[in-house]
Image: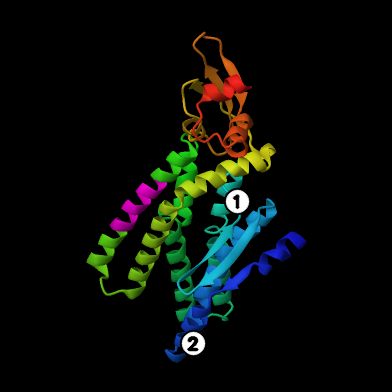
Amino acid sequence: MNRFVTVFKHLHIHPLLWVVIAIGVMTAHFYELCLLILIIFVHELGHAFAAAFFSWRIKKISLLPFGGVAEMDEHGNRPLREEAIVILSGPLQHIWLVGLGFLLWQGGILTDSLYQTFIQYNMMIFFFNILPIWPLDGGKLLFLLFSLKKSFPKSHKLTLYLSIMGVFLFLLIVLFIMPANLNAWIIISFLLFSIYYEWKQRRFLFMRFLLERYYGKTNELRKLLPLEVQEEDYLLDVLERFHRGCKHPIIVKTKDKENTILDENELLHAYFKEKNVTAKIKDILYVL
């Protein structure tokens, strides 16, 4: 129970949200705005409660003027099954919310107008969030999907490439259907900035991923995935082949055709502790 109570300690309300609420009051859209904020809040709590259940480190739950975000202090080394559950726990909240809205409407608590608005908001947020665009839930699921077969940096880059394509497709739809919709342009700007920021941070995020493997809970890694490398391969090139959710025995092919097996932590130790950032595998192998 204490684990879930701490979720609310990480709640952060953006100051501009109060301005949006004030505008909603002045324009007689207060109830509709409250419904929207409630739906977004429950959506983000879905992510946060699932993360708390798996003892993830929750950084912040933010309610923004145009949405919300649940930030986790995790770096890609949790089991992929856990990550999938945490991601899906946001969109799944809309199922019971729609059911609750129906019961409140049947009980006369919600008017016809508010009920229709409530259903529309739930559908809008659900379908928007499952779009395969970073940092939406669909984009994060896309990252997980690529991670099943590809290394962390390749999966990350491919996710961002497809996300930018998705944003431009969304932009074309907005241009043809609702070019004067200010909210749509704000969302597009937010998505483009998020993808750009993620791209700029990609090397840093990859290093955090490796550091978490080196210093973090290695027992969280489930699947063994051997990597075959040559002794002339650079250490960093081998590290860039690391996958999420896997433990990597390193099989070194040497000139005398006798294979040598290294633990992945030996490579991480050489890179981070001994600062052998330009070393080749043979440099580590012969030192050992």
What residue is at 45 percent from the left and 56 percent from the top? 135
Please state if 227 lies on the left or on the right of 190 as rendered. Answer: right
* 146 vs 15: above or below: above
Q: Is residue 102 visible?
A: no
Please state if 263 lies on the left or on the right of 253 as rendered. Answer: right
Q: Using the image, tell me which numbered label, if any, was put on residue 74.
A: 1
- Classify mark 2: residues with Cα within 10 Å, few (<14), some (14-19) or many (20+): some
Mark 1 residue type: Glu
SS of the residue under disc 2: helix
Mark 2 residue type: Ala
Image quadrant occupied by the C terminus: top right
What residue is at 46 percent from the left and 25 percent from the top? 233
Residue 152 counted in the magenta span? no
Q: Main secondary structure of the magenta part?
A: helix
- Classify mark 1: residues with Cα within 10 Å, few (<14), some (14-19) or many (20+): some
Q: CA distance from mark 2 to mark 1?
A: 35 Å
Which residues lie in the magenta part? 159-169
Which image quadrant for residue 247? Answer: top right
Question: Is label 2 or label 1 in front?
Answer: 1
Which image quadrant for residue 250? Answer: top right
Q: Position of residue 110 (x, y in %)?
A: 54, 80
User: Mark 2 = which residue?
Assistant: 22
Q: Position of residue 186 (x, y in %)?
A: 37, 70
